[in-house]
Amino acid sequence: MNITEKILAHASGSKQVYPDEIIETKIDLAMSHDGTTPPTVMTFNKIADKVWDPDKIVIVFDHNVPANNIGSAEFQKITRKFAKTQGIKKFFTHGEGICHQVLPEQGLIKPGEVIVGADSHTCTYGAFGAFATGMGATDLAMIYATGQTWFMVPRTIKINVQGALHGYTTPKDLILKIIGEIGSFGATYHALEFTGSVIENMDVPGRLTMCNMTVESGAKNGIMEPNKAVLDFLKVRNVSDFKVVRSDKDASYEKEYNFQVDDLEPQIACPDNVDNIHPLNQVEGVEINQAFLGSCTNGRLEDLRLAADVLKGHKVHDDVRFLVVPASKNIYLDALKEGIIETFLEAGAIVCNPGCGPCLGAHMGVLGSEEVCISSTNRNFVGRMGDPKSKVYLANPAVVASSAIAGEITGPDI
Amino acid sequence: MKDKIEGKVWKFGDDIDTDIIIPGRYLVLTDENELAKHAMEGVDPEFHRKAQDGDIILAGKNFGCGSSREHAPIALKAVGISAVVAESFARIFYRNAINVGLPLLESEKILSQFNQGDKIELYTDKGILENERTGEEYEIKKLPEFMLEILDKGGLILYLKEKLKEEM
């Protein structure tokens, strides 16, 4: 069996599971946020009084923090009341950051576990060798009540990445390249398992960036066997009660892709779909109104550091607003200590509090019609960040920063 | 779910994502009728005025990709859509739609066989659909029995309640 099958077999109490088989599994950790908890609670209240295990539930306020309108304020009231009544202690409401950064940071993500969340980017946690996937409110309400759900065991596509990333080419560019190859629905219902020297040597933030975007190819989950960086990350946080799961040597895969990345350049996802991928040099010169650095994809310290290196000694273009949103409070603090936040502010960027921010057009940095944004986020759908006539280009943090300086899409000087 | 669903077709292409179906700024709405006013706003802000009860959405590949927001199938149901027929669906949307009682049916290469406004007849028990204008019939993937039951009761919660009542 491969890693996904092994984790699902264990969670369903079976020795072996097979692709396409429908299984019932226990859940190790379930998560919802300020946007999805209220619909979950409304459904939960129709079927149960007490959650199955308050210690296995995590709730994070990240989508509209602080509340930006009466609706989101009411949503947060419902969520606070639920957490209090149910005795949910893993409850992060004070600007700790984006769920997909806060959970790993808090040592809550463990290899080999089954993790679900009412957020499509829950697949991020596959970076730790966990099976993690997104669900809707009704499914999550059932899990909050019973601790169980059903899954169809996914067929697995293996992605083998060899070589080394150079210059300003980052894991973001690699995952964009992969999505461009397999398409926006090339992995629907499938698991994407990443292997090869590039993945084995990749740091935790890079792994999180890549697994985060697997849903943009339709995948149920993205997964990587834990490497030394992951085990060190867990050790620092005193997390030791887990078992590392690895694919068998003779594990079967529906399909395999091979990527050689020595010559990979920065990639851009052009409007209006994430698989509309072009190398940076084909997109250079597109004028922008906004640049956004942040999100569960690319709002980590390493991303901020990379962008600040590009920005140092430069000014943000007069016609561009550059928004920087650290993915968590801890990242914000570290960036302050390193002088990164100072670099952003001096260059003319607007630094906002941790959260999902402008990524989904619900909170800050909303785009007007015909406006163009270059963004380190994960989606560029029609109207994603505001008006349906606005446009979003997805890029890595260095390209976002250099474009903010130039006023048009461009890469940093190497 | 009824064995036969019929309605007027609204045609959409590939990759109709959840930001098109219901933009992120409306996630704080809980009233179905309010959500209905913004259904498909990403491609047609007037959709809620044009759509009539019983209409059917016909789309290409990967319908419902993107966010896990259950608001998406709820908004479509609330605006009067009786079923979505597509060449394929994104997986989170698929589970969400069945859970809230919105029938989804898959049929390969179906999009080019219909014009906007054609009348479509879905026979879920037989696994076929018909274009009334041309009289042509096409195969649809049959849904498993338990999903049909969930749809029949109007969603997972209503289905469970009924089940629990039966057991008592």
Image (cartoon, rainbow, N blue to C red):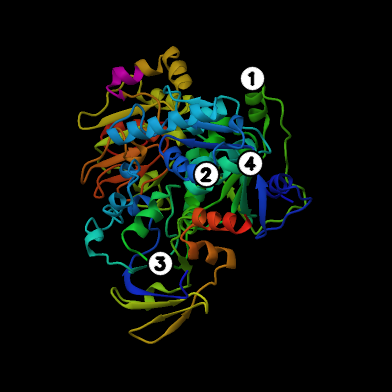
- Asked whether residue A142 is in view, the answer is yes
Q: Which residue is mark 2?
A: A141
Left or right of B162, for residue B119: left
Q: Residue at x 33, y 24 (%)?
A: A352
Q: Residue at x 27, y 23 (%)?
A: A315
Q: Give, as a three-letter code, the residue at label 3.
A: Ala
What percent of the width, then of the height, locates residue A4? 67, 47
What percent of the width, then of the height, locates residue A84? 49, 26
Q: Give, as a three-letter code, the residue at label 2.
A: Ala
Q: Which residue is mark 1?
A: A236
Label placed on residue A27: 4
The secondary element bearing badge 2 is classed as: helix
How far apart, in angstroms, are the residues tagged by discs 1 and 2? 33 Å
Q: Which residue is mark 3?
A: B83
Tell me: residue A409, above or below residue A184.
Answer: above
How far apart, in angstroms, are the residues tagged by discs 2 and 4? 13 Å
